[in-house]
Image: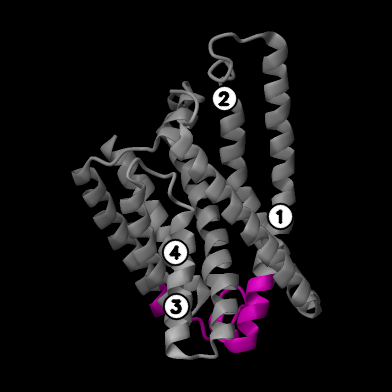
Amino acid sequence: MLYPDFSELVQSIFVLSLSVLIFIFFVVLAVLNLKALKKYYKTGLFVGIIVFLMTLPAAIFNLIYFDPSVILKGRPEPFLKIYIYIGLIVGLGILILKIGWHMIVYYAAVSEWDKIRPEAFTVLKKSKNVPWKVILAAAIFGVVSGVVSTVIFVALGMNESEPLKRITLMFPHAAEAGLIIRIPVLLLFVTGAAVIEELVFRGGLQAFLLRLSGNKRPAVIGSIIFVSLLWAGLHIFNTDMPAIKSLQIFIIGIVFSEFTRRSCVESAMAGHIALNFTAVIMYFIMI
């Protein structure tokens, strides 16, 4: 089935709406913290460029191996092919604008944490007291949770969701690139995704809610649960068992939030990157 059913349409609207709300939230948060922009714009620019460079190979890979005839239902009219490729190239150009988005996310997140616990960012601030043991512990947790999750998912017979299967069909010749290209491209992409997601959820969102909580325990617990639920909600398209996948993301999100609250945002980044790396490597081992 090439086109989504009603339930997938509802899920798409939910994810899109949530993404738009998060975008608006961070723009407003950045404006409210405008005075701190001068202090952090250089690091924000660095983060933005690095994340952009991590996602760029995947965008180029998709452009090379995309087959428009899948969308055109076997009727590859030349002019429609041209329009589709023009759209992809324009999309690649728009990707550059995401550098600005990544800058906004970092700047808003670090500004919010500065109001309650400045040491929540250590590596990116080049602190002399980086909690490397905690960061390593978070990375180990990421690896372990990645292995355990993958084993459980395989045992349950979990597969890609229908939307992901349809996307895969649009790149029928991608496997010809070989693992030596596909694995590094995917690892770079999931690393960039991990960094920006942690800046969004354990960065800006968690810091903002913790500041509002006034350090009252029920409110702190509620803010961590809320942030983890939002993060889980953005992953409902990942598999054909969205409830189980969302539960996994929710539980891991709570642990990442605690690493951040007790130590630093970079520890959650380390755990997230390790989780994604483990999932990717185990996927290629098991296919």
Residue 194 location in percent, x, y?
Answer: 50, 58
Residue 208 location in percent, x, y?
Answer: 60, 78
- The residue indicated by pointer 2 is 66
Q: Nearer the viewer, mark 2 or mark 4?
A: 4
Looking at this view, name the residue that lies furthest to the left. Answer: 155
Q: Which residues are magenta?
A: 108-135
Q: Nearer the viewer, mark 3 or mark 1?
A: 3
Circle 3: element type: helix
Q: Earlier in the sequence, mark 3 or mark 2?
A: 2
- The residue indicated by pointer 4 is 229
Q: Earlier in the sequence, mark 2 or mark 4?
A: 2
Query: Pointer 3: residues within 10 angstroms few (<14), some, or many (20+)?
Result: some
**In contact (CB < 8 Å): disc 3 and disc 1:** no
Left or right: where 13 falls relative to 49: left
Q: Which mark is residue 261?
A: none
Amino acid type shown at disc 2: Phe
Circle 2: element type: loop
